[in-house]
Image (tube, rainbow, N blue to C red):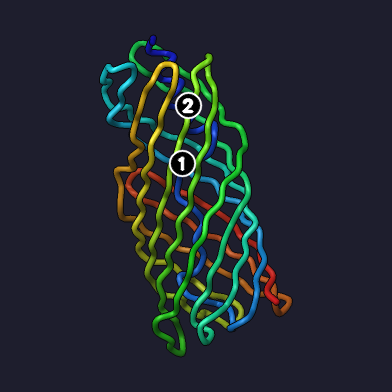
Amino acid sequence: MNKKLLGAILIVTIWGTNSLAIDFMGPPTAGLKEGQWKLGYTHHQSKSDIEVENIRVSGIDYENINIEDIETTRNYFTFNYGTATDRMEIYGFLGAADTESDSYDFGSESIQFSGNSDFAFGIGTKVTTNIYNESDWGILFQVSWLKSDDTLDNVKVEIDAYELQVALGPTVKMTKDWKIYGGPFIYKLGGDIDTTNPKGHGDLKEDSAIGGYIGTQIDFFGNAAIAAEYASTGDSSGFGVNVSWKF
């Protein structure tokens, strides 16, 4: 297997079948009453660095690959439900994502790629731990998965990956209809890439584990809201906007 084909398998397939980067989180506190629903739409863009390690193809070990400046665009529909005495939300999101990079040097070869939009989804929960007059504090947990396969130059590639985010922080009540939120968060990415004909394997890894994010939310028309946020780790950053309606 030549270097260009190996690089294409381990790069184009990862980012062409789906995307891995920081996801939109929203406030770390619950904002729904028990039994209340919220439907929304999220547009999110991010840039990430990632490493593919433990690469082995046809019994031959290869050096780790560092991929920089991966640009990802996500479009999600979101579904939130309030439970547990107005202090807890459970939620899910599903939609499509696409990723691209101008070029990447693998050995002496230069590889350019642009990913296609594909299915993406996840679930999460938010719990308000403390309630005060001017701010609430809470914790957020969310995880997303992908399992995809693709064929490149007659080589079948399968990917099984996950990403996990845990955030802790306040939602500050600036006015009745305006809030600012954010705090530190833990981010973890992992997964496997396997090829057949020839047989190969690689592990996905995100070096940065701790980051921070900040956002703002404005309520209007009683039940509608718009939120915008920025998040960053040492190797990834993202900006997104969410519009929602609760009922």
Of the numbered discs in the image, which one, if any, rests on residue 208?
none
Position in image of residue 168 (x %, y %): 37, 69
Give the amino acid at mark 2.
Val
Residue 116: percent from left, percent from top: 61, 32
**Extreme bottom residue here?**
133
Mark pair 1, 2: CA separation: 24 Å
Left or right, 38 with reference to 232: right
Name the residue located 61 percent from the left edge and 53 percent from the top edge: 94
What is the quadrant of residue 191 in the picture?
top left
**Residue type at tag 1:** Lys
The reply to whether discs 1 and 2 touch (Cβ–Cβ < 8 Å) is no
Q: Residues within 10 Å of mark 2 (few under 14, many from 20)?
A: many
Q: Residue at x 39, y 9 (%)?
A: 2
Across and down, in percent, residue 31 comes to 55, 77
Q: Is residue 162 above or below residue 35?
A: above
Say left or right for 60 vs 141: left
Q: Nearer the observer, disc 1 or disc 2? A: 2
Q: Nearer the viewer, residue 128 or 149?
A: 149
Helix, strand or loop at mark 2: strand
- State the quadrant of the C terminus: bottom right
* Disc 1 element: strand
Depicted 182 relative to depicted 96: above or below: below
Q: Position of residue 92 (x, y in %)?
A: 57, 61
Q: Which mark is residue 47?
A: 1
The tag on residue 157 is 2
Question: In front here: 238 or 144?
Answer: 144
Query: 141 or 195, which lies in front?
Result: 195
User: Residue at point 62% right, 44% down?
Assistant: 96
Instruction: Tell me the residue at 36%/61% (across/down).
Output: 185
> Which residue in the rendered view is the most extreme toward the right?
221
